[in-house]
């Protein structure tokens, strides 16, 4: 059976720049055998998430759009948050993201990339909670203790004592950062997005470690100002 993680990876490969895939090209992109790629695509097509074109390639199905519309309609804050995400990407000239919790899973619900951003748009949908700014922030504000620690890089948190120290810092500062803890050479900064008195999402920016460390204070102050201004409006 196709796992959720595999399905998310495949669906994440489809984008405005790459709206369709053939079996051979997707197999090369994912570094899997052609038979495996074909099985993935056939399974998602049968489930209604993909459709096959007359030329034998695959595209996203409108079923996904319908599901997305139903999901976002149930979140009264989502459209305002999406507009805020666009503003962040434009003004900080970076990749901007909005993440939320699905149970204990950290989900990258939306990402946008400024053309001048110094990293590519990540494809991962489910993120490691203990190695990302959004994971730290959402777990801290929801008082969740991780069951495991994923060592994505040498800088990742791997012990409960390190985690407790980090959570205390997130709660004290009101934001979270990840410095090369998830992807080598990249940093993320996440701040809480409120709806009423509740933190419903983490919103922030992702960029190269070189740029973040060089402009850390300016970036942090700009992101906090933009998000706080939007929440007050």
Image (tube, rainbow, N blue to C red):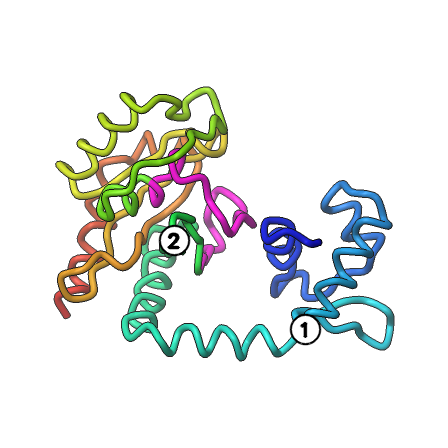
Of the 4 image quadrants, the one containing the C terminus is bottom left
Q: Is residue 134 magenta?
A: yes
Q: Position of residue 62 (x, y in %)?
A: 62, 78
Q: Nearer the viewer, residue 47 or 153?
A: 47
Q: Is residue 51 left or right of residue 185?
A: right
Q: Quadrant of residue 194?
A: bottom left
Question: Which residues are the magenta region?
Answer: 110-135
Q: Is residue 172 left or right of residue 170?
A: left
Q: Which residue appears at 39% of the width and 36% of the height?
A: 187
Q: Which residue appears at 47% of the width and 50% of the height?
A: 116
Q: Residues within 10 Å of mark 2 (few under 14, many from 20)?
A: few
Q: Is residue 35 left or right of residue 171?
A: right
The label shown at residue 153 is none
Q: Position of residue 157 (x, y in %)?
A: 37, 25
Q: Position of residue 37 (x, y in %)?
A: 79, 52
Mark 1 in CB contact with mark 2 (< 8 angstroms): no
Q: Secondary structure at mark 1?
A: loop
Q: Is residue 109 magenta?
A: no
Q: Which residue appears at 46% of the width and 78% of the height?
A: 69
- Number of marks: 2
The label shown at residue 48 is 1
Q: Quadrant of residue 216?
A: top left
Q: Nearer the viewer, residue 219 or 75?
A: 75
Q: Which of the two marks, 1 or 2, is nearer to us in this view?
A: 2
Q: Earlier in the sequence, mark 1 or mark 2?
A: 1
Question: Circle 2 sits on which residue?
Answer: 103
Q: Position of residue 103 (x, y in %)?
A: 38, 53
Disc 1 versus disc 2: distance between alpha carbons? 24 Å
Q: Nearer the viewer, residue 129 or 147?
A: 147
Q: Is residue 136 left or right of residue 42?
A: left
């Amino acid at each position: 059976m196709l796992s959720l993680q595999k399905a998310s990876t495949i669906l994440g490969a489809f984008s405005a720049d790459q709206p369709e895939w053939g079996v051979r090209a997707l197999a090369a992109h994912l570094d899997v055998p052609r038979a495996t790629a074909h099985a993935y695509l056939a399974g998602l097509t049968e489930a209604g998430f993909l459709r096959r074109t007359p030329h034998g390639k695959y595209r996203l199905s409108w079923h996904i759009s319908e599901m997305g519309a139903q999901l976002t309609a149930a979140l009264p804050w989502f459209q305002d948050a999406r507009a805020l995400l666009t503003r962040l990407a434009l003004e900080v000239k970076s990749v901007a993201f909005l993440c939320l919790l699905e149970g204990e899973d950290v989900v990258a619900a939306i990402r946008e990339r400024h053309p001048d951003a110094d990293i590519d748009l990540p494809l991962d949908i489910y993120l490691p909670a203990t190695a990302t700014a959004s994971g730290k922030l959402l777990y801290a504000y929801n008082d969740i203790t991780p069951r495991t620690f994923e060592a994505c890089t040498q800088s990742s948190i791997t012990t409960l004592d390190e985690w407790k120290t980090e959570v205390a810092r997130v709660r004290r500062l009101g934001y979270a950062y990840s410095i090369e803890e998830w992807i080598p050479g990249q940093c993320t900064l996440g701040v809480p997005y409120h709806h009423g008195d509740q933190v419903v999402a983490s919103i922030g920016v992702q960029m190269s470690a070189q740029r973040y460390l060089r402009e850390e204070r300016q970036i942090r102050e700009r992101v906090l100002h933009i998000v706080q201004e939007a929440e007050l409006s």
